[in-house]
Amino acid sequence: MVPNVVRFIGAVIGISLIGGGALMAGIEVGGLVFAMSPLIAAIIVRVVGGDGLRGVGLNWTGRQGWYWLAIVMFPAAMSVSVGLGLLVDAVELGKDVSFASVGTATLASLVPRIVLAVGEEFGWRGYLTPLLHANRVPPLANHAIVGLTWTLWHVPFILASPTFTIQPLWVFAPLFTSGVMAMAFILGETRLRTRSVWPAVYAHAIGSALCYTLLGEGVFARIDPLWFSPRPEGIVMIIVTGVIAILVFRVPRPATPPPASDQLPPFLSIP
């Protein structure tokens, strides 16, 4: 089973390099290849490595609280970040911005964001997280491995997008890594606690839809992006998601036995 971990990480990074390289060459479809590379890598390794559809986690199981966390987590974190920015006059909203306009734009972009979230999460939380769990990797190490891979996976897209950040690399890199790691710990726990990939899909889609809406033209007249950006690398966002990650880990775990073998569990669940 361990070779499949290596195969997946190698495949997802390799495909992301292809997608990012295509974007650098001006081939727009490279963006779609990049976005779907975790799903593509998972399919390839599941076929080649013999896992098939085991452990995908398509069921809706687990306590409802984890699903509600997935739905409200990013809207709450972004509200705190932007709200604090408004309080200290580091953020100014555009003159035509309203709660209704932001909400409408977010909902309008939700369907394509769900598709893109499936492309990522069916790789990260739909395959790599349960695969590591089946190999008896402890939760903290599990989420750290997924988080670091997730961070590294972004590099080709960032290099292909000159406007991705205005921060110097030495500032951006540790902040972005911290933000992605916090998200990996939270989303990974929702997967392990619910035995379902859907909370991670919901959270990812909602977070992306709202973030891109907030960063759209005219929403902010001005904003301090280092501290109050609604993106994962904003310092306030890192603090809020970091606190959420700590609180999530303080929730008692059910007394379940470790996996009986290194085999992925059945199609609709994980141990």
Image: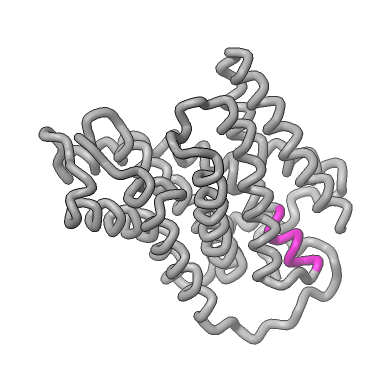
Residue shown at 51%/80% (left/top)? 250
Q: Is 169 on the left-hand or right-hand side of 230? A: right
Residue 141 occupies which quadrant of the picture?
bottom right
Q: Is 114 on the left-hand or right-hand side of 225? A: right
Examine the structure image and report whether residue 132 is included in the region drawn in magenta.
yes
Read off the magenta span.
128-135
Query: Which colour assignment does the render follow?
Result: one colour
Residue shown at 64%/62% (left/top)? 143
Residue shown at 14%/41% (left/top)? 98
Main SS of the magenta part reads: helix
Residue 201 placed where, x, y %? 51, 50
Q: Quadrant of the C terminus?
A: bottom right
Camera-side residue of 67 and 87: 87
Q: Is 255 on the left-hand or right-hand side of 190? A: right
Camera-side residue of 41 and 95: 95
Residue shown at 65%/86% (left/top)? 255
Residue 16 placed where, x, y %? 68, 33
The answer, for residue 216, to whether it is visible in the render is yes
Residue 64 placed where, x, y %? 43, 69
The answer, for residue 206, to whether it is visible in the render is no
